[in-house]
Structure formats: structure tokens, C-alpha cells
Amino acid sequence: MERSITKKLIDWKSSSRRKPLLVAGARQVGKTHSVNAFGQSHYDNVAYFNFEATPQLRKAFEGELNPPELIENLTIVGNVSIVPHKTLIFFDEIQLCPNALTSLKYFNETHNEYHIIAAGSLLGVALSQSMSFPVGKVNILNLYPLSFHEFLLAVGEDKLAQLLFQQELKVSYSALIHEKSVELFKKYLYVGGMPEAVKYYSATRQLNEIRTIQQEIVYANERDFSKYASGAEAVRVAQIWHSMVAQLGRENKKFIFSVINDSARAREYERAILWLLNAGLVHKVAAVKKPGLPLATYANTSRFKLYLGDVGLLGALAELPASILLEGDTLFNHFKGMLTENAVLQSLVAEGAGDLYYWTSGRTAEIDFVFQAGETTQALECKSGRQVSSRSYTQYKEKYPTSPITKTSLNNLSFDDAGNIANYPLYLVGRSVSG
């Protein structure tokens, strides 16, 4: 399965500032497969060490964290040859061995000829709690569920993927191309971007087992709540998780603590939200008062939205049936367009938009996403259907005439009078970041 992270890994290998690499991401987003596939294609061999599958590996890091001694021990324990520059050393589930995480500092400082990648399902949680994080001594990459671009490649739509994501955006697409893309995007809203679900759909073109696969992933995540979060915190993490459908199914998707329960207060749930963010399971979008640079200085961190990391898992939590795919454009508008908006968020994150915000002007106007694009900001209004007239869009343009704003909807690619893109079709919204 072709993933966009592969190019980033190739760039890392040849970079003049290469350091040991940490690959973070939620459970089952494809970290192990992606790193192993990269290693097998670009190195003579891969020395793979999994701290969850082989707990005794941790003993190799109990003494002095001396790289030559560690290499000798790993060579024996793994029964593998480790050659500088030619072997990829892969530490999987490294969050289970804090000393291995610390050792990356010493590899970088004294023996950077060894190419090392470390990954873990809850690496973000571990890093937020670690007192021994090798600050400045590692490179970091995040891996997310498959984007729509990656989904197209996975299901064999290579030509369409090339047309949509590699060719210059100059004219609207033909009705045939547009409607085919919309239909495939509908499938993506249901299947989502978790590799196991995408692989099953690609192999069978059947949807009957997709929800079962997604529910198994949901269950695995929920087990992590109690396994890796403290008692009271685990309960709050689970409460937030199970409120996500109700939160995103509202017209105003601002996160409301009373949706969890009537007595819930923000200060009681701050750590739980942070846990979900660090686990890669949700994304936080804070409100901004104006689209100024840097956006973070205009953020109201107490006013925010939370989205799920994967739109397919959101559909599974909402128990949306596959039959909804047959009901025209219903899927895009279901639950106030929550799947559409979550998928747009997912596309922006995967394409590297960075921290996302939304703009609000009291109760009179709201623009769904605002992010930094070089030396300016980019605003994006998300519409679930084909009717795109919007008072919020008009107010934003009048108030900030020099701040670029576009729309994304079910409509075809379109341009304004100046030749700038006026509307990205939902299936192409990732290009609002990458161009």
C-alpha cells in the first residue's frame, strides 16, 4: 500500500541533518508496515525490535547506554547483522522502553552512522510524560490514516489520483470525472483511512465487513484508555470519546462539556483531552478572533472543536449503515455534515496544514478552518452539499479583504473572476494546502 510518508522517509535517509527518527501516530495507522517496507526497499536489511512482542529486549537497555555495546547486544539478541549506513534499525513500540528512547540521544551524539527509526502506538502519550525525551536529538514524523489521495492509490485508481493530485489546477473537471470522484469520496467517508479497512475494501470491494474491522479498532483504542491512562483520567477519556458523535452531530460543533454530562467542567477534562490528542485519536481546532499572524496569538484556547482522527471510525461510532451510500448525497449532510467536516479536517492534517483554527464572529458568522500558509493565512469554508451561498463567507471577505478564503463543497472545481480557485470539490480539498 503506497503511503505518502515513504517520500519523507527517503528524504530523511539522505538529509544532512538526519538524526534518529521518531514516527508517531495512532494505533493501527500503518507505522510498522510503512517503516518496514521503506527499510526493505532502501537498505540492505532491517534489524527489527519490538518491545511489546519481545519484552526481554528491554534488558539490553538496563546498563550504560553506550551505542557500541547496545549494537553488540542487539546483534546477539536479534540474531541480525547491523552495519552502519546499510542497516535500518527499527525500534517498534518504543514507548514501552524509556531507556531505549533515551539511548537515541547518545546514538545521535556519538554514533549517528547508525540509521534508527523508532515508532509506537502511544508514542505521543509517552513523550508527553517522559522525563528523558531526547530534546533536539531526534527528527519527528507523524503518520495519519490514509488521505483520499492514498485511498485512490490503494483501490487502484492511479490515473484518477494522478489527474486530481499531480496535474495543475486550471479548469473544471468533466462531469464524468467529477461524479466518479464524488462517488469514490463517498466510499472514503464510509471506509475511512485505517489501513486494514482500506485493504479489505480494495481486495473485495465489499462493505459488509468494514464496520466490523472499524469496531475492532475502536475496541482496541478503548482498551488503551484503561491500560495506559490513570483510573479517573481513563474514565474521563472514555467519556469524551463516547461524546464525539453527539458533539460533531450538532449544528454548532463547538465542544460543549455539558454534552458529556450536566456536571462536567472544563478543568476536570483538560488532561483527558490532552491524552486523546497525544494518542493521535482526536484533533483540536481552537477559535481565533482574527486571521492574523501568527494565528496562535489570536486563539481562544477555551473555545474549540474536537474531531476524530479518522472519518471511518466516526461513522462506526455513529453506527451509520452502508445503505446510506445509496441515498444520493444524504451521506454528506448526515448529522449536520459531521462526516464531511471531519474528512476535510483529516485531509488538511494529512497534507501538512499544521495547527488548524476556526474563525467566529460572535453568533453571526463562522468559518470552519483557518491555517497558516507561508506568510499569510488561508480560510476555508466547508459546505456539505451543493448549495454554497453563505453569509459567513461574505462577512469574512468584507472584514478581511486581503486574507484569502475559498470554499469546499460537492460542486466542481471553479475559479473566480481573477482566476483564483473559488471552490475546491470535497475530494480535492487537500490541495488547498499543497496547491
Image (tube, rainbow, N blue to C red):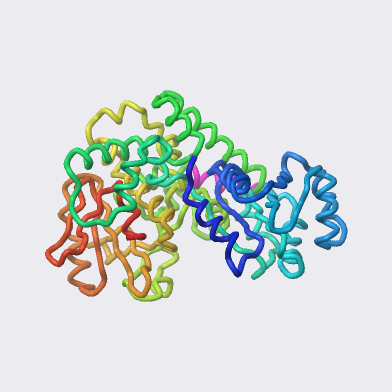
Secondary structure that dominates the magenta span: helix
The residue that appears at 58% across and 65% down in the rendered structure is 15
The magenta segment is: 231-241
Horizontal side of 120 relative to 176 (left or right) equals: right
**Viewer-proximal residue, 132 or 422?**
422
The residue that appears at 69% across and 46% down in the rendered structure is 45
Looking at the picture, how far across and down is residue 306, in whole percent?
Answer: 43, 53
**Viewer-proximal residue, 208 or 285?**
208
Horizontal side of 410 relative to 27 (left or right) equals: left
Would residue 138 be seen by someone viewing this image from the given angle? yes
Looking at the picture, how far across and down is residue 296, in whole percent?
Answer: 43, 71
Would residue 268 be seen by someone viewing this image from the given angle? no
**Viewer-proximal residue, 181 or 253?**
181
Question: Can you tell which quarter of the image residue 53 is in?
Answer: top right
Looking at the picture, how far across and down is residue 419, in whole percent?
Answer: 17, 64
The residue that appears at 62% across and 65% down in the rendered structure is 18
**Viewer-proximal residue, 286 or 202?**
202
> Residue reaching furthest right?
63
**Residue 142 within the segment the image draws in magenta:** no
Question: Can you tell which quarter of the image residue 14 is in?
Answer: bottom right
Give the quarter of the figure containing the C terminus.
Answer: bottom left
The residue that appears at 21% across and 44% down in the rendered structure is 385
Looking at the picture, how far across and down is residue 151, in whole percent?
Answer: 40, 41
